[in-house]
Image (tube, coloured by chain):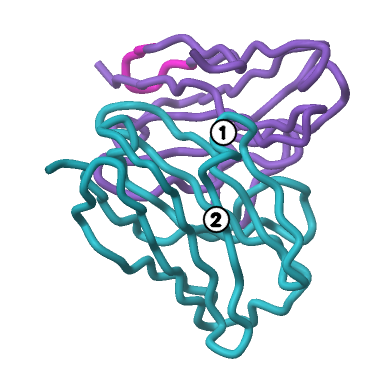
Amino acid sequence: QSVLTQPPSVSGAPGQRVTISCTGSSSNIGAGYDVHWYQQLPGTAPKLLIYGNNNRPSGVPDRFSGSKSGTSASLAITGLQAEDEADYYCQSYDSSLSVLFGGGTKLTVL
Amino acid sequence: QVQLQESGPGLVKPSGTLSLTCAVSGGSISSNNWWSWVRQPPGKGLEWIGEIYHSGSTNYNPSLKSRVTISVDKSKNQFSLKLNSVTAADTAVYYCARVSVVVPAAIDYWGQGTLVTVSS
C-alpha cells in the first residue's frame, strides 16, 4: 500500500481531457515537498513528465500539466492521444527522509 | 547525454545477496547529483530503494534499510546495490537512476532496468 494514493486506472477517448490524482498527507505533499510525475510506456523505464509540481522538461508536450494543492496533486492530460496510453506515477518526499512513489495509474485511451 | 547501465546476476537464491552495479557514462559520478536505485516487481508499482552521493553519503528506504547497502566507486564511475536475505518478494526489475541536481528528488535519467528473479 503506497503512502501516495493514486486511482488504479483512468480512461478517456481521443481528444478528451483526463486527470490523475495523487493524495498524500501532512508529512509529505502537505509539508510542502514538490510532486513529480513520470510516464512509463509498456516495457520501458519511467520518464520524467512533470517536475516541481507544474514544470515540463524539454520535449514534453504542453498537453501535460501538473498542479498541487494542500496534501494532493494532479496530472492533467488534454487532447488525449493513443500514444499517451501508459502508466503514470507521482513522486514526492517524506519528512522521514524517504522518497515516495504513488501506486501508479494505468491510462487507457478508448 | 548521461547513460546508465545496470549489470549483475539475473537469478539469486532465497536468503542470498542480490548484487547489482550501475555504470555511468556521458557524465561524472562525482557531479553534484545523487544516484538512486528504484525497483518494480512484475506488474506492480515503483519502489524507491535508496540513493548515494559521491562522498559516500546515503539515504535508504526505511522498509529496506536493514538489508540494503549502496556504495560508489568513483574510479570506475559506477555505483552498486547490495540487498541481503532476499526472498521471492524481492523479485523485480531494478533500475539505477540519476537524481536531478536542479530539482530535489526528481529523477531525470534512468537505466533500462534489469530483471532479478529470486528463486531456488
> What is the C-alpha distance between the residues marked 1 and 2?
11 Å
Amino acid type, callout 2: Gly
Amino acid residing under circle 1: Phe
Q: Colour of chain B?
A: cyan
Q: Residue at x 39, y 22 (%)?
A: A15
Which residue is under mark 2?
A59
The chain coloured purple in the image: A
Q: Is residue A52 left or right of residue B8?
A: right
Q: Secondary structure at mark 2?
A: loop
Say whether residue B22 is left or right of residue B56: left
- Is the C terminus of chain A in the top left, top right, bottom left or bottom right quadrant? top left
Q: Chain of mark 2?
A: A
Is residue B113 highlighted in magenta? no
Q: Residue furthest bottom?
A: B75
Is residue A11 left or right of A75 when viewed as pictured? Answer: left
| Residue under the image location 76 percent in, 20 percent down | A68
Q: Chain of mark 1?
A: A
Dot 1 and dot 2 within a common chain: yes
In the picture of the structure, the residue carrying the numbered disc 1 is: A64
Position of B26 relative to B37 (above/below):
below
